[in-house]
Image: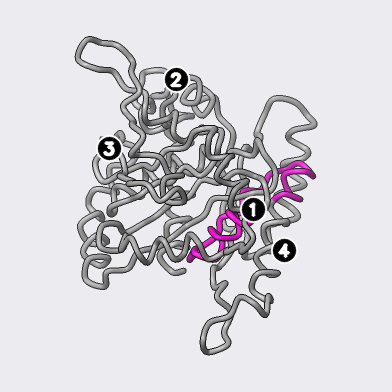
Amino acid sequence: MYGYYFYNIVAQKDKHYLIFQEYNIMKVVTITSLKGGVGKSAIATLLADYLAYYGRVLLIDANRQGDTTKRFVYQENEEGEIVNISSDENLFENIFRKKPVSPLTVKDNLDLLVATKSLKEVEDYIEHKERKSPLIFKRWLKRSKLSEFYDYVIIDTHNSEGVLLDSFYLASDLLIAVAGSGRDEMDGAIGVYNRAEALKNDDNLVNDDDEPIMKAKIVFVGNLLKSGGGTHGITATNDYLEQTKDNDLFITNIWERNIFRDASLENKTVFDIMNRSKYRDKSFEKYFNKLKESLETIKNSIDLA
């Protein structure tokens, strides 16, 4: 389904899926950074697509720019026209507007809650409520009984701080802070770590046993790292690799290749286009194998969270 580079996933799928069914474990993962343009949406779509081989996945687009949504909702109909297959019932923001919400099935084992620019209105409303509740999303997860339907919930976020982003952190099992070789990209990732620690140490965010509600583990994933394209980019990447190599929180890196740009331009995922002839040379085969290793590393961190 996703190409011969990932052939060995299929053999493992049933084993992992049965483990999740036996223990009924649902993992909530937030993909985040306080810096825009670091590739959060690309990682969210890539990871959700990959995890759908192992279990049932709900991908939530909580980024008002809707980049994740665009990768899935524009599909070809029977007349060959590209149409938007989503409806108002598929809007993520409905959970805050007390409206019916129904995930949109976009692939086998993969459902989506979509985002539009109107999500900004909801963010502003939550932010300026007289009684702010950073537990609003955690409570919705519990009420909706998502664990009966999904093994993984993946959340793509906007880079703005506030109550909504805090609510994702507090509801998560794992935070994936997207880092990069630039100063701003690294600052955005470190900002996630600092905010998570602040929530963990907030005396107002404790349970009945006086334990922190914030329990999410945090890992860093380097993204858009360059192996070519000029001396400056390569030097910055080498510096990043040197600075992070002994830090266990930095679990893996994803390297920049044109296939990510091509997929974005077509509103598709990398897996949708990876079998095209232009990506069948030896260099891409090697790249896809490394990409699979990175995704498997991320999956292992999720399963252990």
Asked if residue 126 is among those painted magenta in the image, a careful observer would answer no
Q: Which residue is outermost to the bottom?
A: 209
User: Mark 1 = which residue?
Assistant: 127
| Element under disc 2 | loop
The residue singled out by tag 2 in the image is 266
N-term mark: 2 or 1: 1
Q: Nearer the viewer, mark 1 or mark 4?
A: 1
**Would residue 4 be visible to someone looking at this image?**
yes
Q: Residue at x 44, y 66 (%)?
A: 139
* Closer to the camera in the image, 7 or 258: 258
Q: Are marks 3 and 2 in contact (CB under 8 Å)?
A: no
In three-dimensional space, the C-alpha distance between marks 1 and 4, rounded to whole angstroms, equals 20 Å
Would you say residue 180 sits in the magenta stretch?
yes
Residue highlighted by disc 4: 194
Q: Position of residue 94 (x, y in %)?
A: 41, 45
Lower position in the chain sequence, tag 4 or tag 2: 4
Q: CA distance from mark 3 to mark 2?
A: 17 Å
| Crowd tier of the residue under label 3, counting other residues whose Cα lies within 10 Å: few below 14, some 14–19, many 20 or above | few
Label for residue 107? 3
Residues at marks 3 and 4 touching, judged by CB atoms closer than 8 Å: no
User: Residue 47: where, in percent of width, then height?
Assistant: 43, 46
Compared across the picture, whether 238 is left or right of 20 comes to: right
* Neighbours of disc 2 within 10 Å: few (<14), some (14-19), many (20+): few
Q: Which segment did they paint magenta? A: 163-188
User: Does any portion of residue 290 appear in the rendered image?
Assistant: no
**Residue under the image location 79 percent in, 44 percent down:** 183
Q: Up-down: is 244 above or below 92?
A: below
